[in-house]
């Protein structure tokens, strides 16, 4: 007969297994979405989770532009490759992920114990761009997992004209696009029958 502690532990293990499956094992990148909408509350919750992930100096350079209307997605579609164009026009919600070229101005706010670090990046535009790009991609990974944690599917895409997207949506030059992510509930025919192969532990991991 199970004790109360054993029952609670077993329930906790099942919850963790379900969470891992939803984020990794069962989650797939969809090629098609259902007509079910993604609410404003869900879109906000995705960001609220994304912002909690660690970045260098807690710099948080990622900026998200949600495109919900057909008009907004049509503005984006002309800068996408053909397969990505169709997916985006049919998705209920699309996010353009970019980094703030002036992210260093927020250092006194987000890294208040060392506000002087802002000055390191004021004159070093190259370092500023590299850190903004690298940490925004890190946050993009958190963004995808946040989408999955909401029970939604994420379709990240890199096949687009970044200069064109930036000119269309960020003409002041303060943001630079890095990724486009379609978001929604997967359709019945959303993906291939088999998951594409992943590299083995022996191939990808070394222990020294």
Image: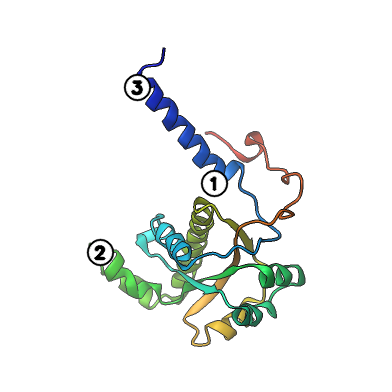
Residue farthest toward the top in the current orientation of the protein: 1
At horizontal 62% and vertical 76% (from top left) the residue drawn is: 162
Q: Which residue is mark 1?
A: 23
Q: CA distance from mark 2 to mark 3?
A: 45 Å
At horizontal 68% and vertical 43% (from top left) the residue drawn is: 198
Tell me, yes or no, whether the two marked residues, 3 and 1, touch with CB atoms within 8 Å: no
Which quadrant holds residue 11?
A: top left
Q: Is residue 109 above or below residue 152?
A: below
Earlier along the polypeptide chain: callout 1 or callout 2? 1
Tell me, yes or no, whether the two marked residues, 1 and 2, touch with CB atoms within 8 Å: no
Q: Which residue is mark 3?
A: 5
Say which of 207 and 32 sits in front.
32
Residue 146 appears left or right of 202: left
Between label 3 and label 1, give the one nearer the viewer: 3
On-image quarter of the N terminus: top left
Residue 122 position in % (x across, y down): 36, 77
Residue 29 position in % (x across, y down): 65, 54
At horizontal 59% and vertical 38% (from top left) the residue drawn is: 205
Q: Which mark is residue 178?
A: none
Q: Which residue is mark 2?
A: 114
Q: Residues within 10 Å of mark 3 (few under 14, many from 20)?
A: few
């Amino acid at each position: 007969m199970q004790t109360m502690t054993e029952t609670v532990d077993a329930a906790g293990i099942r919850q963790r297994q379900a969470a891992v499956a939803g984020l990794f094992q069962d989650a797939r990148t969809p090629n098609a979405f259902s007509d079910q909408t993604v609410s404003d509350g869900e879109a906000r919750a995705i960001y609220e989770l994304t912002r909690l992930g660690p970045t260098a100096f807690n710099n948080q350079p990622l900026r998200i532009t949600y495109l919900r209307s057909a008009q907004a997605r049509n503005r984006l579609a002309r800068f996408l490759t053909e397969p990505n164009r169709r997916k985006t026009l049919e998705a209920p919600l699309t996010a353009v992920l970019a980094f703030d070229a002036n992210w260093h101005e927020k250092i006194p706010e987000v890294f208040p114990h060392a506000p002087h670090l802002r000055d390191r990046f004021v004159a070093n535009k190259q370092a500023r761009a590299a850190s903004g790009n690298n940490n925004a991609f890190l946050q993009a990974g958190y963004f995808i997992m946040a989408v999955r944690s909401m029970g939604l599917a994420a379709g990240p895409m890199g096949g687009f004209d970044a200069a064109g997207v930036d000119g269309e949506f960020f003409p002041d030059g303060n943001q630079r696009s890095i990724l486009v992510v379609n978001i929604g509930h997967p359709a019945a025919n959303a993906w291939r029958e088999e998951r594409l192969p992943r590299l083995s532990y022996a191939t990808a991991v070394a222990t020294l």
